[in-house]
Image (cartoon, rainbow, N blue to C red):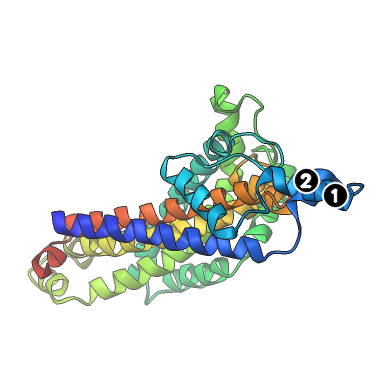
Amino acid sequence: MLRFLATRVALLLLGLLVAAVLIFAVLRVLPGDVAQVVGGTQASAAQVARIRSELGLDRPVVLQFLDWIGGVARLDLGRSLVTGSPVAAELGQKLEVTLPLAGLSLLFGLGLGLPLGVLSAVLHRRAGGFLIAAAAQLLAAVPVVFAGVLLILLLGSWLHLLPVQGFPLDGWRQPGRAFASLILPALTIGVVEGAVVLRFTRSATLEALGQDHVRAAAARGMTLNRALVVHGLPGVLLSVVSVIGLEIAALLVGAVVVEQLFQLPGVGRMLVADVGNRDLVKVQSELLVLTGLILVVGAVVDVVHRLVDPREREAA
């Protein structure tokens, strides 16, 4: 197990390094000049050149990368090229919105997808199972923006059950208002991602229903549903654990869109603004942190899968 953990940590660090190189290289290809943004439209060529020199943008690209990645290794994400403020402090504030949003979205997605996926598989020969599966196919294809607009109209504008935009200025110092402002955005992401979980759970449950040990338990007098719960669902849950890592990535991508729609001051909204300002240091640090979160979740899922799945331990 220790060897597996060491290998997984090494792969995680290697993945972060490769991601850092790619992010840094891609951002340097984008059009635009942050020095021009800082100087304004009336800045002369000499002024823009001076700003580039002050910001260190005229240094060799390799040295810029080494300075940035060295700071990241020391947990220093640098300073904004536009405002001069520390990136880590601002990013930490934005993550206070984005991480709870992603976590709540995951809870909604699993809460909808797991039970309905099992129910759809159990009723797969009946009209109810077909309707659930068809609804999941439809919801999985719905864009997050469209789902958000529909929920805003239904639960916000028509029924007035939930706030549709904004976040308290005091943040989590007003926990009730802060939590309420995240319910509708999280439900927007959770419904779409829950449809994906539902389809995956349905397939895994149908496979479990056809396994020999489940059929044998039913043949010994246990009802098929009880045999599924006792002998089949543990394997289904192990399969679902594997897909959670992929869903986390989708949740973070969906958060970028949803934060714009619901005017939430999270990482996604900040990232869009920083890309527009060509604030390279902030953008590359934000992308690396998001990538790191996805890689860490994937590593944790792999470790949990190895710990709870006896088949993988025996194979190892």
Left of 269 or right of it: where is 174? left
Q: Considering the numbered disc 1 on the image, is that residue within a helix, a strand or a loop? A: helix
Residue 158: x %, y % from top left: 73, 45
* 232 or 3, nearer to the observer: 3
Residue 72 shows which numbered tag? none
Q: CA distance from mark 2 to mark 1?
A: 6 Å
| Residue 161 against residue 24 in the figure, above or below | above
**x then y, percent, for residue 4:** 18, 59
Secondary element at image label 2: helix
What residue appears at the point 67 percent right and 36 percent down from the top-left corner?
84
Q: Amino acid at mark 2?
A: Arg
In the image, what residue occupies the spot 14% across and 76% down?
Answer: 212
Pick the front one: 120 or 140:
140
Quadrant holding the N terminus: bottom left
Image coordinates of residue 213 in percent, x first then y, are 12, 72
Query: Quick check: can you spot residue 261?
Result: no
Residue picked out by circle 1: 46
Residue at image position (66%, 66%) is 29
Amino acid of disc 1: Ala
- Judged from this view, the residue extending furthest toward the right is 42
Whole-percent x, y for residue 279 in the image? 68, 49
Which residue does the image show at 57% across and 70% down from the upper left?
A: 138
Q: Could you say which disc has been placed on residue 50 in the image? A: 2
